[in-house]
Image (spheres, rainbow, N blue to C red):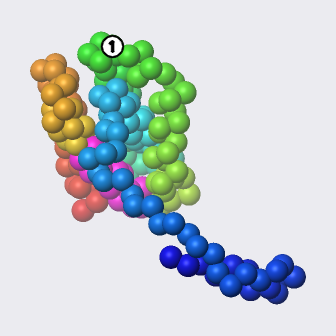
């Protein structure tokens, strides 16, 4: 492949072209797969981001449905999710024997990566908050299913971890129902 150098308008000397060696990208099977600890840590970061977002939605919900949204929807979700984060961290540390799974700096950094790609509930209309909550909850269900599938594929999904992740996905599917009803 040949790339043109500077056009010369800045006063630099012009070279006709320069040779560039094209290096092939590694094959997918050559990439280093994630460890079980990295997989469960990524899930924890996603759940923490979801928790923080729902807590924000709980605090700033408004409009005619305020009382129900504040207490029975977003309040219910964020408090239950907070408890589930603790369970996932403890199970992850126990099953995968890595205290790094519980590192608050790592969890916060992972959650920030997610939140940076989400719209804040702040300064949003009540209907927009509900719509976003449904999108993020649907993503949470898929992430939970994907986490279990990856760990199973690797042969490191214990019965207890499978049961816990399955229970969380079940709970999160219930949130999808609540949010779908809210959006109607």
Horizontal side, residue 181 vs residue 12: left or right: left
Q: Residue at x 52, y 33 (%)?
A: 108
Q: Main secondary structure of the magenta part?
A: helix
Give percent across and percent down for residue 140. 30, 44
Q: Residue at x 39, y 58 (%)?
A: 25
Vertical placement of 142 versus 2: above or below? above
In the image, which residues are magenta? 127-143
User: Front-most of 56 and 150?
Assistant: 150
Q: Position of residue 121 (x, y in %)?
A: 49, 52
How many C-alpha atoms fall within 10 Å of the one at disc 1: few (<14), some, or many (≥20)? few
**Residue 114 placement, left or right of 90:** right
- Please tell me which residue lies in front, 155 or 159: 155
Residue placed under numbered mark 1 in the picture: 97
Q: Is residue 74 above or below residue 136?
A: above
Q: What residue is shown at x 63% (from left), y 75% (from top)?
A: 18
Asked if the magenta segment contains residue 134, the reply would be yes
Q: Nearer the viewer, residue 160 or 118?
A: 160
Q: Tell me residue 157's x, y (percent).
A: 17, 26
Q: Is residue 172 left or right of residue 127?
A: left
Q: Residue at x 34, y 45 (%)?
A: 31
């Amino acid at each position: 492949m040949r790339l043109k150098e500077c056009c010369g308008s800045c006063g630099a000397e012009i070279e006709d072209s320069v040779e560039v060696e094209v290096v092939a990208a590694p094959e997918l099977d050559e990439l280093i797969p994630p460890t079980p600890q990295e997989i469960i840590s990524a899930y924890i970061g996603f759940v923490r981001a979801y928790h923080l977002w729902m807590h924000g939605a709980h605090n700033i919900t408004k409009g005619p449905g305020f009382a129900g949204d504040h207490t029975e929807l977003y309040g219910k979700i964020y408090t239950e999710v907070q408890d589930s984060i603790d369970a996932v961290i403890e199970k992850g540390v126990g099953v995968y024997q890595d205290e790094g799974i519980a590192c608050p700096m790592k969890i916060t950094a992972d959650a920030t990566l997610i939140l940076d790609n989400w719209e804040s509930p702040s300064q949003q209309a009540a209907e927009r908050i509900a719509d976003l909550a449904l999108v993020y909850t649907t993503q949470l269900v898929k992430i939970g299913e994907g986490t279990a599938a990856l760990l199973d594929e690797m042969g490191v999904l214990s019965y207890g971890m499978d049961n816990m992740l399955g229970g969380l996905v079940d709970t999160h599917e219930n949130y999808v129902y609540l949010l779908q009803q809210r959006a109607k």
